[in-house]
Amino acid sequence: MFYHDKKLQYKVRVDKPNPQFARALQQAIGGVEGEIRVCLQYLFQAWNSRGPVRYRDMLLNTGTEEISHIEMLATAVCLNLEGASSSVIDTIVGNDPILEKIVGGGDPRQFLSGGLGALAADANGVPFNGSWVVSSGNTAADMYANVMAEATGRTLATRLYELTDDAGMKDMLSFLIARDTMHQQQWLAVLEELGHGNQYGVLPIPNSFPQSQEHQEFSYAFVNTNIDPDSPTVGHNTRWTQGTSLDGRSEFREIKAQPLGDEPMLAPPIPQGHAQIEQIEKANDKS
Amino acid sequence: MFYHDKKLQYKVRVDKPNPQFARALQQAIGGVEGEIRVCLQYLFQAWNSRGPVRYRDMLLNTGTEEISHIEMLATAVCLNLEGASSSVIDTIVGNDPILEKIVGGGDPRQFLSGGLGALAADANGVPFNGSWVVSSGNTAADMYANVMAEATGRTLATRLYELTDDAGMKDMLSFLIARDTMHQQQWLAVLEELGHGNQYGVLPIPNSFPQSQEHQEFSYAFVNTNIDPDSPTVGHNTRWTQGTSLDGRSEFREIKAQPLGDEPMLAPPIPQGHAQIEQIEKANDKS
Amino acid sequence: MFYHDKKLQYKVRVDKPNPQFARALQQAIGGVEGEIRVCLQYLFQAWNSRGPVRYRDMLLNTGTEEISHIEMLATAVCLNLEGASSSVIDTIVGNDPILEKIVGGGDPRQFLSGGLGALAADANGVPFNGSWVVSSGNTAADMYANVMAEATGRTLATRLYELTDDAGMKDMLSFLIARDTMHQQQWLAVLEELGHGNQYGVLPIPNSFPQSQEHQEFSYAFVNTNIDPDSPTVGHNTRWTQGTSLDGRSEFREIKAQPLGDEPMLAPPIPQGHAQIEQIEKANDKS
Amino acid sequence: MFYHDKKLQYKVRVDKPNPQFARALQQAIGGVEGEIRVCLQYLFQAWNSRGPVRYRDMLLNTGTEEISHIEMLATAVCLNLEGASSSVIDTIVGNDPILEKIVGGGDPRQFLSGGLGALAADANGVPFNGSWVVSSGNTAADMYANVMAEATGRTLATRLYELTDDAGMKDMLSFLIARDTMHQQQWLAVLEELGHGNQYGVLPIPNSFPQSQEHQEFSYAFVNTNIDPDSPTVGHNTRWTQGTSLDGRSEFREIKAQPLGDEPMLAPPIPQGHAQIEQIEKANDKS
Amino acid sequence: MFYHDKKLQYKVRVDKPNPQFARALQQAIGGVEGEIRVCLQYLFQAWNSRGPVRYRDMLLNTGTEEISHIEMLATAVCLNLEGASSSVIDTIVGNDPILEKIVGGGDPRQFLSGGLGALAADANGVPFNGSWVVSSGNTAADMYANVMAEATGRTLATRLYELTDDAGMKDMLSFLIARDTMHQQQWLAVLEELGHGNQYGVLPIPNSFPQSQEHQEFSYAFVNTNIDPDSPTVGHNTRWTQGTSLDGRSEFREIKAQPLGDEPMLAPPIPQGHAQIEQIEKANDKS
Amino acid sequence: MFYHDKKLQYKVRVDKPNPQFARALQQAIGGVEGEIRVCLQYLFQAWNSRGPVRYRDMLLNTGTEEISHIEMLATAVCLNLEGASSSVIDTIVGNDPILEKIVGGGDPRQFLSGGLGALAADANGVPFNGSWVVSSGNTAADMYANVMAEATGRTLATRLYELTDDAGMKDMLSFLIARDTMHQQQWLAVLEELGHGNQYGVLPIPNSFPQSQEHQEFSYAFVNTNIDPDSPTVGHNTRWTQGTSLDGRSEFREIKAQPLGDEPMLAPPIPQGHAQIEQIEKANDKS
């Protein structure tokens, strides 16, 4: 069950409102790397959790923390849309003016639909999409999904940091970046615990499917699809084509791509599917 | 540049067509865990790749291999939709008949829109969505996204394996499961290489943002949002609340959630936003 | 800022697991009438709130309550997907067996993607979409959006109630239905307060746009587009074609639809738009 | 059945084409507050209508009128994309130049995909989505959905009005704003009629579910989730925490949020779901 | 401007309600091949039309007709969801029982969200999407889009015809199939007129771009990407690899796929993009 | 099965990077007219192909070629996002400065999410959507879908050509435009072959449904829905209202729209659907 108070987890201050930055911030709210995604992802993983209770508990904590991050960012959007025009900064900050051009203008829906408010959408106004919420039922797979979310999320936050020189915004982002640092650590710590002290112990995910049932001659082989005889291949001196596999169970090797199956042969169309007559009459004709 | 031949990477055979299984297979084609996603993800990562050439090359190979996997699965869908009714298996296989009920019927659009063919959609007919294609510009973030994709992808493949007792389908899936085993290894091998022989060497992602610019007092602290004084907290004996952090740079600790910011205070609505008059006249009224 | 404890707002019990019902429950989680929508809607309205503080506070409370409702429903989905097959109820309950057919089978992604867990999607597996989150910046418009959400939400909950005879599920739903009753009341109470003791006092929304700037001859006129001279028109004895308008500012009347504008005349295509030559050469040709 | 003539319902004139405004207008065509939505919403409500014929008839009329509104707005987009550059107005109009920045540039797809034409999309190019079409089968719920659509729609139209000083566009919008005034009235008039002369008579929606089957101790209670003992709570002197409920059936009261359910306990993962081994072996472990 | 009457364009009768068929019919309402798509497509093409007035007029007529088709199909859905259970037909009709399995159950949202009504969605409940509305600004491109819409639409209608033996439904579909026959003819007739009496006269679309500005050595060459030396190539005796091109301007030929560009070389990551340090330091490293 | 080499199909060079153009190019990658769509469309048509093998083979070739086109365009996006600011061109090129305004700024997600890379999205950042992939099971319908895709695709490419004066970009586009010329020819050549030497021989699509089962009095009749007695009707001297139909099977004629069906009459709401009481009690009341 959930509770709230009226304060923010960390202070949000905007000295010079900037609608372009208000648009960019939307990516951290409703984008695929954003806080609504991680919030719902951690909470659904908690609610769906089957296995040791400690993981459910941990996920509930961090999922709840993320609601507070959405709240901070929504507040930051609102504050960036306010204010006397004289104090508006004209440009996105960066070493290269090309960034100013890339960010473009603001998001018209923040005014048209929101009356100067935040949206449940990304920096292009594309709505948040529930398909981004990963809760697989396999804790190791979920943890890698969480590491990935925090890795792309922290990368996004550092890019936002580069786009502003507003002291308040930089301060808020330096807090959020720190939290992403911890969250990366935390999900990897679960993987280490799950793997009995070694992250690679969780492999292959899922580890409950007997490897004897996979075609093991292909389980540690890098497939090279490059057909150019004159081009240096990818495999020289790379970690993924030679040496012991990371899980310690086999040796990496490289094989040349080649078909192991035949040309597929499908049945003719059924009458009720109403293909063209010529498809039915000349099915599998090879002339 | 890309080439093809007319054969399949691995043989695809269906002994007893099963429309319910044809529906379930769609998840592996156009679902968030499916092959269109990994195919485009690896190829976009290759095309957008900035940094050592070896990673671009590797991504091109595996991205190209995944096209062949979509081809195999689309063929499997077509074959599962064919055939004399007498040979149709009636039920999804499993130890628990509840799975039969969960899978439900087939996908009507495989007939209505496809004439007994595969769709670029998931097991519920939801179309493939390009937002699932992660190409972040940060190779470590990308690699975790790839591990996650192969972890959820292999989990999906093993669940499909459990739903069928068709020998041909089991054989095809045992090949795809083996490839997912390798792909998990391969992306982790890149992370190990990127981290100078230790996967945790890539942390925090991105490692090019100076940690001095984050609020470091929050960088290794687990935030506990649980307010129940009688409930055991998550932090006892867990790897993520004590001991050295995985990157070796700090010690984990646990802190109780508390607000560090004030109650937010927004400016009154601007006239052009046409809020209700009462909002404008009583802005920030606290009565 | 947000907090949690580990218990549920109300007890969730499933006596006879039913995967069909687990699918139907998804509509109340990730559907357009569902709890993720109202949760985010009330929270975004709170975070974007400009005007009297009391409305922000109220929205924060109810938005927070809704997170607990998602939690209850996700738990209910998980429990409906469990269990010994012998205790599975075979059919959706109702006075008319047609409902059983309509509900169909379960959602295969609850197994394939979730390992028997809830998804951030509706009863057809369509992902939750952020575009459903209404936060307009106008409190009266927001309140009607909230009444509508609770009206369709309570209707959905009563339909779910009819589909099950599981005592635990009926008990949970009777709690949620009661909460929807209150929430309908509560948003209407805000409208009454905003309208100075009369809900119609908020009209027209927004009330901050001077009515002198609208074409007032069309502001209280019902437009009848029916061209059938033999058919009784809609307007006889209806509240919306005669009598004083609800806001007391005018009289309703009915007018026959007729064009007040001309046939539109667009400029020829510009060369850079590469229309067909014939479009450019014969622009606005009327032969 | 439907018919047309070649003229517009109201005149559409653009004196100074403005591509930025052409983008903003898209919100009123294909946005969630736009005319495609209300058009399809009223028509689907009519086609699905069960109950007194008068409501079906009314909905057909207004749904048909809305097609003419889409036509007007699409024409307005086309005209705003035309014209000699010398007559282009440079900026969006408003009291605050920040609005110019928010609106940003035009929509490139109006040229790239449309050859200077309107799209079935919103102001950010997000396509119209059929999930916005509400037709619930409950007339009272539908009417609140319609009031909400016209309230957010009229708010949008007034904001567009503020963004332009083109006399033709202002004239067109003052017509559309007037129609939205009427439509708000009209749906509320249905609610009053349905409620036997009092809008609150329709409560709770649906009114055909016996209130004896809801947990009535929670039906008129405001739940306060705020845990801050020092913060004034929301409930003082507010209409929704004291006094007679709007439907006259009870008294409002306020209760402190507290869990009435236990910590949820899920069954262990089933083998076919291929969780990690550790989840299965240590299911519900609390250490 | 648009008008209506209260009758249907063609009679809609359902003798034996069938919820499975009600689901399948959704594809013809809100699916990519459905009537909402063609309705909006023809109307947007009309409203955006630049060029001879006759095409705008024609499009308005047929776009208006399609609204009446949506109305018929929505009515058919409602009627298929009604009725005494004794008269319900149990199965989808067809020569092959596999079709029954493919169609599966009904759409739960027709009850849960619609109260036994039609939705603006396809047969899998995926909402109608405005991106399907093609209005390109080039009349020839639009006409091919329309032919395609009617070709897939008529194919869908014939498949629906095969799924039912309800006399009323077959009668309605035979009307709609006839209309699709005409509409295919009609758009092709425009292409013939646009091409000065020969459909191929419209090629290449757009014909207003000077062919001298394209790389003409590739304009009539079939590119063969097949690398298998033992496999018969596609080009033998096919119309698209030899003989005069359809537009009469050149000769078809076949060329073997080969790269004409170099391996791409991108600049190193910029610092503000926060790639991993190793990407920046070893940019374009080829070891 | 699929293969690659490391070079590009055609050279991609950018002299003056331009982020606005990088945004516009996204339409050709992930837009509805873009290369991901045609790539997947041709490949799914190949994989689902039932009928003569030659069509499957042809589709495989061109589908494979399109992957190389995505690769070229993604490379072009990356190059347009690079470079010293001094060489950045300031404006989109065109005869009319209005185009500059329409295109607007860049796509912030190319930086925020991609680190200066291409996305699987369109020029507004809307993700690629699998619903655009047409594979109908009817080869004639598929070929028209392909002609349409290449017609809108080539139109898009010519518009992009007009937006740039970068010599490298113009060169790349002139290659892609040439390929679109060929692809239009090629799909029409299949239609001619399928139609036994005459494209109209494929009509009506599907040609395997007996025309005797359609209501043939409506199969060649243009329906005029225009009710204005004073307005010249569309039918004068137009190819689609008089003369022999294109398939040579009938004569075109024009009929005035009129209802052939009755006003629809639906059953009252069922109790489990929880309409308002008044709907149930006054069902089909006509007062």
Image (tube, coloured by chain):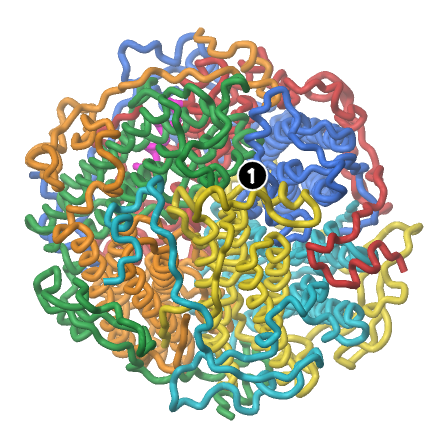
Chain colours: A green, B orange, C red, D blue, E cyan, F yellow
**Residue C224 is one of the magenta-drawn residues:** no
The quadrant of the picture occupied by the N terminus of chain B is bottom left
Percent coordinates x, y for residue F104 in the rendering: 58, 41
Q: Which residues are magenta?
A: C60-76
Residue located 24% across and 55% down the image: B147
* Residue that sits furthest to the right in the current view: F230
Q: Inspect this view and state whether residue B282 appears.
A: yes
Percent coordinates x, y for residue E132 in the rendering: 58, 56
Q: Main secondary structure of the magenta part?
A: helix
Residue located 36% across and 38% down the image: A159
Q: Which residue is mark 1?
A: D138
The quadrant of the picture occupied by the C terminus of chain B is top left
Q: Secondary structure at mark 1?
A: loop
Percent coordinates x, y for residue B39 in the rendering: 36, 63
* Residue B232 sits above or below residue A213 on the image: above
Foreground residue among A95 and C128: A95
Three-letter code for the amino acid on which mark 1 is drawn: Asn
| Image-based side of B136 in relation to E98, left or right | left
Q: Inspect this view and state whether residue C33 appears.
A: no
* Residue A29 sits above or below residue D1 on the image: above
Residue located 42% across and 39% down the image: A96
